[in-house]
Amino acid sequence: MIYFPVLRQTVMLGTIIAFLTGCMHDIPNLGVENNRLKPCPGTPNCVASHPDTPESQKVPPILYTAEQSLAYDQMEGLLSERSDTIIVTREHAHYLRADFRTPLMGFIDDVEFYFQVPGVIAVRSASRIGYSDLGANRRRIEEIRKIFSERMAEPILEKKVPIQTD
């Protein structure tokens, strides 16, 4: 005779796995098109910095004053250090795309950084599945903005040769 609580747990786990597998989407077709990142869908689980983004989904672009290649290298380094991030697309000094995975369930959020013009990084962060992310994408972009800005503000230390005096 089968022990019913074990059977019930097994069926529930199987149902959850089947549901989540059915919810998984293919990798979305993202990137730069017509000098901008793709617009957010009509769901609240996406934020973007493009001016025509609805206010509820809008975040400011990330600004910097250094050379674009230095800003790109800093952003790439910042993303590479994160344990929840995999950089999936690199276009030197122009575009970065990364997958962010949630720690518990492994859901994927697609995050893009487009170095649109010198001094401006357009951003887009969207969950692949679901309707609401409870503000996770907005918080992530703000955290990245803060860390990036702090790193860009740090002075570059030059090797100084001591002056010899007699």
Image (cartoon, helix red, strand yellow):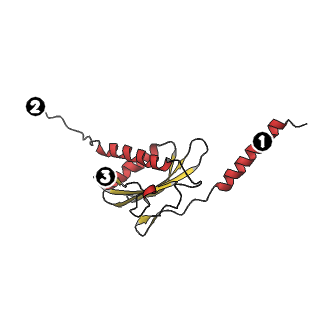
The quarter of the picture where the C terminus appears is top left
Which residue, given by chain and number where applicable, does mark 1 sit on?
A: 10
Residue 64, numbered label:
3
The answer to which of 57 and 10 lies nearer the viewer is 57
The answer to which quarter of the image holds residue 35 is bottom left
| 2 lies left or right of 160 | right
Q: Earlier in the sequence, mark 2 or mark 3?
A: 3
Residue to which mark 2 is pinned: 165
- Res. 84 visible in picture: yes
| Secondary-structure class at tag 2 | loop
Q: Is residue 125 visible?
A: no
Q: Within 10 Å of the Cα at label 3, are there few (<14), some (14-19), or many (20+) other Cα atoms?
A: some
Relative placement, left or right, of 83 versus 162 is: right
Mark 2 or 1: the one toward you: 1
Label 1 neighbourhood size at 10 Å, few (<14), some (14-19), many (20+)?
Answer: few
Which amino acid type is marked by label 3? Tyr
Q: At x 63% / y 55%, what residue is drawn?
A: 24
